[in-house]
Image (tube, helix red, strand yellow):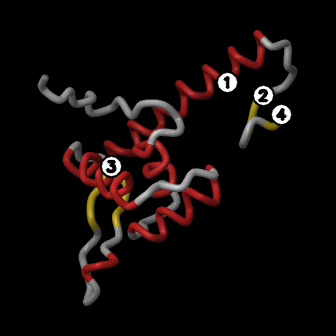
Amino acid sequence: MPRRTAPKGDLGRSNEPPVLILTSLAAGPKHGYALTKDIEAFAGVSLGPGTLYGAIARLEERGLIAPEPVGSDARRRPYRITGDGRVALESAVREMRTLADVGASRLGMTGRVSGRGALA
């Protein structure tokens, strides 16, 4: 069966590696280890090397991230979010916000959900 590739702007669910990586890179360029540590800090998710670098490769192929010029240490190649990556992340964030607002409303919660499920 042929492998399906997501459309350029479709990132998947909020806890999927592409969303987590783009969210991390929205704060500035990072190499793989720094991405892993940042994602653990803000999302509580630990990405293994295969998951992380597989997602990085797919994001780069789709033009959503790009490598920064490499200095003397090619092992620590930093990546940055591109304009297309920013647009895709903004779209994913809007969808997540809508879902959170609908879920909170249906649960009878007041206020908006922020952070890791805490009410603002």
84 lies above or below 105: below
Q: Which mark is residue 112?
A: 2
Q: Which mark is residue 119?
A: 4
Contact? badges 3 and 1 (CB < 8 Å)? no
34 lies above or below 102: below
- Label 2 and label 4: CA atoms lie apart by 6 Å
Q: Is residue 59 left or right of residue 109?
A: left
* Residue at the outermost front position: 1
Q: Which mark is residue 100?
A: 1
Of badges 2 and 3, the one in the foreground is 3
- Where residue 6 appears, x then y in whole percent? 27, 29
Amino acid on which the number 3 mark rests in the picture: Ala
* Residue at the outermost top position: 106
Contact? badges 4 and 1 (CB < 8 Å)? no
- Circle nearer the N terminus (2, 4): 2
Circle 2 — which element?
Answer: loop
